[in-house]
Amino acid sequence: MNKVFYELKFSGKLPSPAGVGMQILQLTQQEDCGLDEITKVVRSDPSLTGRILKVANTFTSSRTGGTAPTAPPLEEAVLRIGFASLRDLVLGFSLISNNPKATCRAFDYGAFWHISLGRAVSAQYLTELGGRGGGSESYVCGLLCGMGRLGLAASHPERYSRILESEGADDPETLVSMETREFGINHRELTDALLADWGFPQRLARAAATYQQVVSGDFAEPANLKVLRRTLQAADGVVAAITANLVTADALSDTLRNSLKELEIEDTQVANALTSIRTTWREWGALLNVAAPKPVARPTAVPAEPETAAKTVARKDGVAARPSPPPLEPSGSPGASVLLLESDDRIASGFEGWLRRAGHNVVRSKTVRDALSMAVTHAPQIVIAHGQTDDTEALELCKAMRSFEAGRMTFFLLATANSDSRRLLTAFDAGVDDYLLLPCAEGDGLLRLRAAQRVLQLRSRVAAQEKTLQQHLAELAVANRKLHRAAMTDELTQLPNRRFAEETMRDGWSEASKQDGDLSLIVGDIDHFKKVNDTHGHLVGDVVLASVARVFRQEVRSCDVACRLGGEEFLVICPNTDLVGARNCAERLRDKIANSAIEVSGKKHQVTISLGVATRRNGGAPAASIETLFKAADDAAYESKRAGRNRVSVGHTA
């Protein structure tokens, strides 16, 4: 896995499902997963439990045409929803509520989640229209396609903003190149690494990461991966169609039509389903608190340019066309945001009175479930919880809040009438920061609040210092990566150099050996290059090398690695590629170079290249080592030269 991914992972800034979300994902991927195991995990998160019950109640209401009188038991709710839909719900709740804060100014987080959800719903519908199983897989892949962009926005908000604001960032391939140059990893690779790290099957991770990437027909692609990638591509087209308010088959884009044709789905089927997809998209948005982004108000001095649907979806996955204005700074008020858990109206009135007189903003809840929901939505700085009798409700809320990042940063004040030291020690062990003995005078309460605010200020300073330190470490990591990249890059052609090639070949060989998979090498040597240098000079020779390198860079897949070994010799490392695919790639390189005119100082020069191909498994036993494989490809390249040049030969490892 990419070393840069581990650096980002250890920074703690990458998006990730919360603990319960990850447990549900892992459980539902097991064939022997049972109802008892799932409900036990769901019950550990009161907020999630409440949302699941609400959704199940909604399902009942829609099917009976009325309102369900009471929420069903959790076991019944899970059965009503179904394991697959439960996984989708938990994944959405977990990722969206636990996603990184909106710190990247050029990344539109609201639009990102809105489009991701639309893609997920559309992909599920398309799978069902095509008569294929695995609709939930399509939903999950559609929702997770943009995780790499979200991760880069969270890990490097300032640098990623500059990239997104750069000219050419609208083009997916240009964006990938800019990301790789700046961070040593791009959003596709990061998506793949994230999903693999979360335990998703390789096929799902690869489809989510590469669905926008054009794959040459020369390379064999597993049928199920190809179908899933096409489904996600078509889902993007459906999102665009819905955003543009298209309702007829004739109005669908050519790109969407082509994707549907490959999926064997009729245009009219999709056109007829657009209204249903739109409705389901909205329903899921309401359940997950994901609203369609509102248009950004333009300055009145500039004539407003109408926003067309094409412009709305032109930049996918929430990348804003123009940077959003920075959020307003806090007003500087000494008051804190306070969440009060109190079921008794009389006691609550007393608390609210002196809290508001002191300038604090108060929201009140009567139940633990509602309090936890308010904690997620309002993000209070201080929680005052009064539990009846033995403080059970207050401690239940405290434990639940300490299970997620924002809740751990909240100052938790237990209001209790019980002064027993053992009970109070139990409360502190549960995560309580301080206690307020009831009944209390207003002055005593304000003193506790003043101490809480001081602690919060200290925490804020520590968090700011930690953020600064993380920024410095990130900058140092980027600088180190740039130095490492420079040491691994050929200065003239900007391709990876021989040292990088040797490391990558060893890694590729190790991975192919573990999976007993394919690995192919292509070695190319420019024909009569010494004559070019002797006749036209080294300046022309350098231009020829750079031009040939450009062809290699453009003609191979993003998962392949093109390198300059030295002199006029080049190498392509092709993972998961058989002999037919590698030979087709070599032929394409040969043809492109032979038919390209290289212009230097007004004069055109033409060169050819001889190539050799070898694969790890070529009918018989696999090659003995990576050195054996490389030698076979290198010998084949020289066989091409001996046979007349400008051709491709196949090497044998036996």
Image: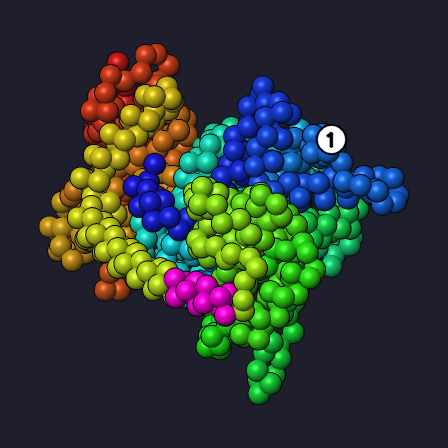
Q: In this view, does 622 lie above or below 15?
A: above
Residue 555 quadrant:
top left
Residue at image location 13% in from the left, 54% down from the top? 538
In front: 329, or 554? 329
Residue 595 seen = no
Q: Where is residue 73 in the image (x, y as percent from the top left)?
A: 73, 33
Disc 1 element: helix
Most common secondary structure along the magenta stretch? helix
Q: Is residue 483 left or right of residue 464?
A: left
Q: Where is residue 207 in the image (x, y as percent from the top left)?
A: 51, 38
Residue 43 seen = yes
On-image quarter of the C terminus: top left
Residue at image location 65% in from the left, 60% down from the top? 347
Q: In this view, does 572 lie above or below 27?
A: below
In front: 162, or 535? 162
Q: Where is residue 287 in the image (x, y as percent from the top left)?
A: 68, 49
In front: 34, or 644? 34
Q: Where is residue 553 in the image (x, y as percent from the top left)?
A: 33, 47
Q: In this view, does 500 lie to the left or right of 439?
A: left
Q: In this view, does 328 lie above or below 375?
A: below
On-image quarter of the N terminus: top left
Which amino acid type is shown beneath numbered disc 1? Glu
Residue furthest left in the image = 534
Residue at image location 49% in from the left, 49% down from the top? 419
Residue furthest bottom in the image = 301
Residue 452 is covered by the magenta coloring: yes
For label 1, the residue is 76
Residue 421 is covered by the magenta coloring: no
The magenta segment: 443-456
Residue at image location 51% in from the left, 56% down from the top? 437
